[in-house]
Image: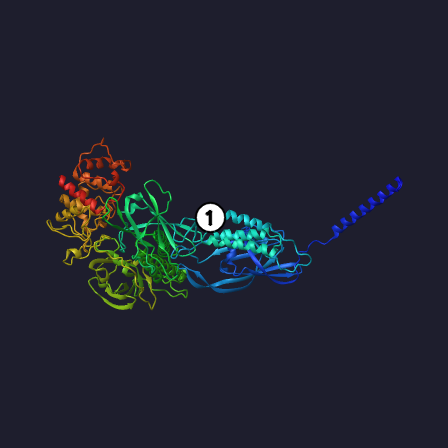
Amino acid sequence: MFSKKKLQRFMSILLACMLLLSAAQAAAAETAPRPASKVRDGEYDVNVQILKDNTNEASVAHTYLESTTGKLIANNGEYKLRITFKNYDWFEYWGSLKPGGTPSASPEAVSEFVTAAELEVKDGQAVRGPQQESKLVEGYYGTVEFPIQDVMAKQDVLMHIVVKDLYLIPGGAPFEYDHWYVAQVAFDTAGLPFEGEEPSVDKSRLQTAIEEAEAFAATLTYVPVNGVYAEGAIIGLTDANMKNAIAAADAVFKDESATQEKVEEQISLLAQAIDYVNQSRSVAANVRLIVLDSLDADAAPSTKSSLFDSTATILKRHTPREHANITINEDADHFATISYFRPSTDGTATFQEETALQVVPTGLTVGAGKYSAQLIQRTSAQPAHSISGIVKLSYTTTAAPDVTETLYLSLNGTLLDDLNEQIEEAQALHDRASNGDLKGRFGAPALSALQLAINSAKLTGTQLSATRGNIAAASAGLTEAVNTFQASETDPGSVPGPGPGTPGGSTNPQYPADGSYYVPFTVLKYGTSSTSVANDYMISPALVTVSGGNKTVSFTVVQSAEITGLTIGGSSGTSRDSGNNTRIVTFNLSNLSSTVNGWVKVDWSSLNYHHEYDIQFKFNESAATYAGSSPEVIGGGPAGPPSLPNPGGNTNGENPKDSGNEAESNEDEEDSEQGGTEGSKIAFNDTANHWAKTSIARAVELGIVNGFSDGSFRPDHIVTRGEIAVMISRALGLEGEGDADTLKDFDSIPSWAQAHVARIAAAGIISGFEDSTFRPDGQLTRAQLAVIIARAAGLKLDADASLSFADRDDIPAWAQKEVGAAVEAGLLEGKDGNRFDPNATATRAEALTLIIRLLEKL
């Protein structure tokens, strides 16, 4: 047995041993090497991800990787990563953060980053351009190499992306993107040969990725390909995509034997699943809706435009398939039937009429008395197919189930707005170069060519029925013309013109000394200062050659085949064909200082247009510029669709000369002061089922109006101030010279309306505006029409008259007494729903009906 003393000694030795062992273990723990993270020298393939800043979600830049496999180069503990991008022409900068640097998404932060080395740049095919065509893109592929600070951590990178030549909608505006942003580059370290012990498997990033994927999936709404699209909805997929990806990632997370390679693979697959789903997300773009009664080149907005909201929404995903939401300003039960026809896939303004499709309510809340409906514009995903952007709509109402109405809904309003903005910018450039701060930098031929391109684009810009293809072609043509014009800019001192000529010191002749000059000219309506429509078909400036006081004037006529006759100063001159349906005409004239009388004859068979006009030429001799010793007549290609006056169209007030046939010689049905012959019977091709056919027939019999030369009356077209003046003047038999002196724009009033406007103004029935203009082409609202009819009838006005219309608060205060008096006299009636609709534009049928009632009351 141990004695007490021995026991104490034993315990002391045991305690000392334990302390010694503990100290040895602590020393061993302090001196044992940490698991190494140094990769052996060499080059290794690694799986690369580019992540959004401080997330595990794939960056858009990740989709630009030509391959997700990169090359890691290890050299004595220092690393570089080599990757290849597509869309590399969009990369203005790429760099990796320096050790100790502070990441920031701005150009000022470049000093904190190491700029990547550019190893190789190659061209490649990509879908680009306004029509989304496949083209060879310069610098499409790029291979870069940049430092990696720590293979076990994400590497901060800075990039500057400027997207070029990308269009989301064929024929639409280019997609503009110019941003700096920070992202992180991560790569899979599994399989890399580390010196020492391999690091343990880290699943924290996978856990975060799963949580983010679950949160993302919870926000998704799925819609079938043929379903009703909604903004942000996922089209054509189901929730199985995200469920399967999350389940697979969760299985790896719970697998204790999973390697780091498997963990990183699932992180990458989750990011890919999210990216794949996002590609099928529906995006929305608001567009201006245009409602038309026809697809004629001169079609005006339909009088039924108020049936629809002026803004529609185009919905699409990454494919060309398109749906469109429209808002109808009536309850659904207003319609007995409503259907539509999709546009054809050849880009023309025709339709797939073999199947009528039903308009489908979207279920969106758009306000009382309205409902939102969806149309499918395009189902084809073939790039070769294109659509006009116009839908044909047919409907019947519960009030008139036997009457089918047809309208055309153009979703191209915003494209037209963009084109017209482009036209305005081009015109401003032309005007600056002609008479502004750029004057002297461009020659006369360049100015003329640009103006011709602008005029050609205007023909499309003013055509409400233009297709997407029409608009895209006009925009592309104008863009090319502007680029060509800008490329022709020269030093102001080198442009030929009056005064000193070339830098060599020679002096050019001064107009009107003998020599050749470019002289601008304008074609005017005869006897006015207004530009004739013929001006668009004669290219200014003219080449004027002066010799001994005589002047030989030459210029180019476009649409040569249709311009069948042309004289200046009584001479038909000489002409020669210059190709592209143009010809050069030459005239000998002695004096250009005053307007020169002319005549033009137009035979446009495809439009059934055959007319002749008196015109005048005005030459601007003060702007004459020397044309050089070997000048050429400035020419051009075809001018595009015609802008000549349309028979029956009342577009410009320029009157054809009488050819002996009133229906053909009159530009429109108001063109003759004599009107029709009382007692005549005319059967129009568009009034047989019209509600106002009796009033129209009576008005024709009384000689108040005629029809148009194509056999139509166009009862639902908007009536102008000039037309209503003629109608009332004829109906009341007003006589005398009237009062023309008080109207500043009297000379611009069409000759067929001038006498009637003067008489109406003198009678106080229709007065001018505050600026003393009459504005004959202005439209009339129903409230304005009520005031005019009340004045014409001499009705007694009652200041205390009350109106029972449901929308009486919308009737302007200045019209309420006249509306009340006209209703009391039985001249005016309301519309459906006891509405007066005071701000709606008045139609020809409405105006004539009131005039016939007026005559019956007198």
Q: Nearer the viewer, residue 22 or 370?
A: 22
Give left or right: position of 854 versus 327: left
Q: Quadrant of the N terminus?
A: top right
Percent x, y of residue 465: 30, 54
Q: Is residue 303 visible?
A: no
Q: Quadrant of residue 515?
A: bottom left
Percent x, y of residue 710: 19, 56
From the image, tell me which residue sits under label 1. Answer: 220
Of all residues, the one furthest to the top in this rendering is 800
Number of marks in picture:
1
**SS for callout 1:** loop
Percent x, y of residue 430: 36, 56
The residue depicted at 44 percent of the width and 58 percent of the height is: 165
Of all residues, the one furthest to the front in this rendering is 1
The residue depicted at 23 percent of the width and 30 percent of the height is: 800
Give left or right: position of 714 versus 332: left
Percent x, y of residue 185: 57, 55
Query: Badge 1: few (under 14), some or many (20 or more) residues near its Cα, within 10 Å?
Result: some
Q: Quadrant of residue 622?
A: bottom left
Q: Nearer the viewer, residue 382 or 462?
A: 382
Q: Quadrant of the C terminus?
A: top left
Rendered view: 36 above or below 839: below
- Give the residue type at disc 1: Leu
Q: Nearer the viewer, residue 84 or 776?
A: 84
